[in-house]
Amino acid sequence: MVKIDRTPTPPPSLAVEKTKANGSYKKDDVVEQLASDFRGKCYLCEMDELQSIEVEHLRPHHNGRNRDRMFDWNNLFYSCSHCNSVKNRGIYEKNVADCCTIDPEAIIRQEFLDGRVVVSNLVDTDEARVTASLVTDCFELSNTPIRTKACQVKVRALQRTMTTLYKALGEYQTEKTERTLRTLKGLLSRSYRFAGFTRTYVRSHIATYPDLAPFVALEES
């Protein structure tokens, strides 16, 4: 989970659809703008090239009973179906961090340790604790066979990305070339898949890679 720069102006269809009894918050302009703003990644797990895309509400609209939330541009997020279903539980109705208004990397620590995803809170707030728990569940929840399989796919994809990062870091330590630096800059960009994990790893080892500090800096609050 990383900071997202949301386009401030809502897509035109939202105001129109809100006036309709069966209006949709998933019109083409909404989906396309979310895909662009969220860099084609699920905002929770950060996988890209999603096969199943959903427009997710950060704060629930309770089956349309809260129409203000239902059509609020700032409440719509780009998600995969797996993470949306994981979040669709009472424990995540509130206190999940809005990654469009704060930098999640400032409140949670996202790590890949011994083949497992471990996300912890960096600050002692409900927002940090709930967000850390949700991101962990998106990778580790195994309460149904379908969720178990979906989590395994995400963990394997994360493993491949982290392996690529470790290899690039090793090459950079051996020989600091412009090519390797460009590779690392890409891996540490917020637009790259699983950037919350790659950036956390480098920040945790910044004494070894001081030249990379500008690439993993947090958003200024």
Image: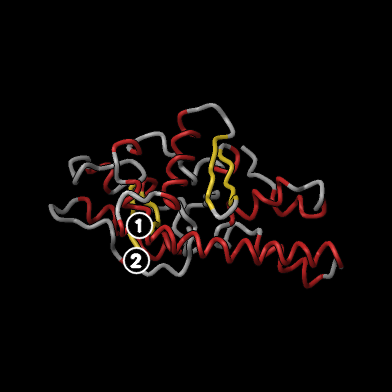
180 sits to left or right of 191: right
Residue at position x 54%, y 26% in the image: 124
Tag 2 residue: 52
Q: Position of residue 218 (x, y in %)?
A: 65, 44
Looking at the rendered structure, which numbered label has been put on residue 17? Answer: none
Residue type pointed to by label 2: Ser
**Is residue 90 at least partly visible in the picture?**
yes
Q: Pointers 1 and 2 in contact (CB under 8 A)?
A: yes
Crowdedness near tag 2: few (<14), some (14–19) or many (≥20) residues, C-alpha within 10 Å: few
Q: Is residue 94 positioned above or below 139 on the image?
A: above
Q: Earlier in the sequence, mark 1 or mark 2?
A: 2
Nearer to the camera, 21 or 162:
162
Q: Which residue is mark 1?
A: 82
Farthest-out residue, right? 175
Separation of marks 1 and 2 at Cα, in angstroms: 8 Å
Q: Mark 1: which secondary structure?
A: helix
Q: What's under tag 1, amino acid-wise?
A: His
Q: Where's residue 137, x and y in %?
A: 42, 47
Quadrant containing the C terminus in the rendered view = top right
Which quadrant of the structure image shows residue 81? bottom left
Q: Nearer the viewer, mark 1 or mark 2?
A: 1
Residue located at (55% from left, 35% from top): 121
Is 162 left or right of 135, judged from the image as shown?
right
Q: Classify residue 19 as left or right of residue 204.
A: left
- Kindly tell me whether residue 12 is visible in this rendering: no
Tally the marks: 2
Q: Quadrant of residue 51?
A: bottom left
- Residue reaching furthest bottom? 179
Q: Residue extending furthest top? A: 124
- Rendering quarter of residue 148: bottom left
- Give SS at disc 2: loop
List x then y, in percent, for residue 206: 77, 47
